[in-house]
Image (cartoon, rainbow, N blue to C red):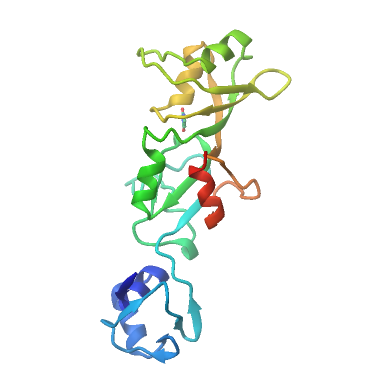
Amino acid sequence: MIQRIDKIISSQMNVSRNDARSMIKSGSVAVDGKSVTDSSAKVDAENSEITVNGKPLFFKEHIYIMMNKPQGVVSATTDNKIKTVIDIVPEALKRKNLFPAGRLDRDTVGFMLITDDGDFAHRILSPLKHVPKTYIANLRDRLSEEARQTLENGAVLSDGTQCMDALVRVIDEEGKVAEITIREGKYHQIKRMFASVGNEVTFLKRISIGNLHLDESLEEGECREITENELSLIEKR
Ligand code: URA
């Protein structure tokens, strides 16, 4: 991808275009071993060795972040009152144009994917792609086998909405914790599915998107970059 050097420095280092220009002017930036002081110089970012103060810049067109979303933050880019998932991305991973790819309720925790790649987000969120998402739901009441099967066969929500079939597994002895995989993303879907069988979700955590699991070493509120291999697991069938 051929771009102006000031644009590359600004996007990759999350600095303003003006700051990028100052860095370039001061002689901090080199391309393939030669100092570049003209901010408008065009550079093949993927195939050149760019350094800033002698340190290599590893160009990535897009960034993909796995966050273990904590309770109390909203899945939005900006909000006047409440902290958003973008607000809590650490500086080292911040880029312009980051947004959450999908939504989790304010009180839901777990795997939130944050990126600046609109095409990728569009693909994984498309209702036609049916990318599976798995959640752990703590329930108020024991889940009966009959209710489990109803959910597996496609719940009908209180407003008459028909859900697709799902996978539902009870994972504790008491029968009050379920692992559920759905292939669509209706508003408050998991909570409404369990409500449709007379139960209530008291705690909800998303543990995977596609075949990519939440890294359990991430504490709530922590983030890390998703590797290329991991990224391919999201869309893999
Ligand atoms: N379903 C819900 O009800 N809430 C979420 O946050 C995600 C799925």
The outermost residue toward the right is 173
Q: Is residue 207 left or right of residue 61?
A: right
Instruction: In this rendered view, identify the residue nearer to me: 59 or 194.
Output: 59
Q: Is residue 195 left or right of residue 99?
A: right
Name the quadrant containing residue 20: bottom left
Residue 112, x across and y down, in percent: 49, 44
Q: Is residue 42 above or below residue 109?
A: below
Q: Is residue 77 above or below residue 38?
A: above
Task: Identify the residue at horizontal 44%, vertical 48% (top origin).
Answer: 85
Residue 226, x across and y down, in percent: 53, 54
Task: Identify the residue at horizontal 28%, vertical 83% (top origin).
Answer: 41
Quadrant occupied by the N terminus: bottom left
Residue 59 visible from this viewpoint = yes
Task: Identify the residue at horizontal 56%, vertical 54% (top origin).
Answer: 229
Task: Identify the residue at horizontal 43%, vertical 29% (top origin).
Answer: 184
Q: Is residue 70 above or below residue 194?
A: below
Residue 93, x across and y down, in percent: 47, 62
The outermost residue toward the top is 146
Residue 156, x across and y down, in percent: 42, 13
Q: Is residue 228 above or below residue 199?
A: below
Residue 222 visible from this viewpoint = no
Q: How many marks?
A: 0
